[in-house]
């Protein structure tokens, strides 16, 4: 893994825990788990959009 990718992963994890888990869910993992399906769907929707944008850019 490159240093840039490693730093990006670390930034994502820090953002996830600081902003999402501790901020939105106030550190309550039960609330997070209750929204698991919604979060997964939102993530997959975002990834799908980004893949479409990347494919368009390559064309």
Image (cartoon, rainbow, N blue to C red):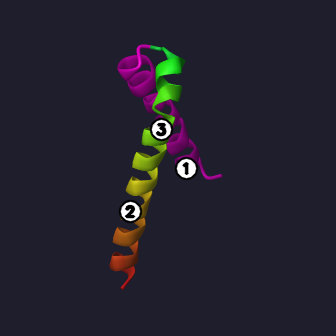
**Mark nearer the N terminus (2 vs 1):** 1
Query: At numbered mark 3, what does the secondary structure look like: helix, strand or loop?
Result: helix
Residue highlighted by disc 3? 12
- Nearer mark to the viewer, of 2 and 1: 2
Does residue 2 show up magenta in the picture? yes
Residue 44 percent location from the top left of the image? 46, 54
Q: Locate residue 9 relative to residue 54 in the image: left or right.
A: right
Q: Is residue 30 above or below residue 35?
A: above
> Mark 2 = which residue?
50
Magenta segment: 1-26
Q: Quadrant of residue 54?
A: bottom left
Q: What is the CA distance from the residue labelled 2 to the residue labelled 3?
A: 17 Å
Q: Against 25, is 5 above or below? A: below
Mark 1 lies on a secondary structure that is: helix
Residue 42 — which label?
none
Could you tell me which residue is drawn at 43 percent across and 22 percent down?
18
Judge whether residue 45 is colored magenta: no
Task: Determine the residue positioned at 47% across, 14% down.
Answer: 27
Image coordinates for residue 7, horizontal then vertical, percent: 53, 41
Q: In this view, which residue lies farthest toward the right?
A: 1
Q: Residues within 10 Å of mark 1 (few under 14, many from 20)?
A: few
> Looking at the picture, does residue 21 appear above or below residue 50?
above
* Residue at point 39%, 81% (across, down): 58
Which of the marked residues, 2 or 3, is nearer the chain's N terminus?
3
Q: Relative to 49, is 32 on the left or the right? A: right
Q: Which secondary structure is most common in the magenta stretch?
A: helix
Q: State the separation of the CA atoms marked 2 and 1.
A: 18 Å
Categorize mark 2 by other alpha carbons within 10 Å: few (<14), some (14-19), many (20+): few
Select label 2 or label 3 by which is in front.
2
**Residue position for label 1:** 5
């Amino acid at each position: 893994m490159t240093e840039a990718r490693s730093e990006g992963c670390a930034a994502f994890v820090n953002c996830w825990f600081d902003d999402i888990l501790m901020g939105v869910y106030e550190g309550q993992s039960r609330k997070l788990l209750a929204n698991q399906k919604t979060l997964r769907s939102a993530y997959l929707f975002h990834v799908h959009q980004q893949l479409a944008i990347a494919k368009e850019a390559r064309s």
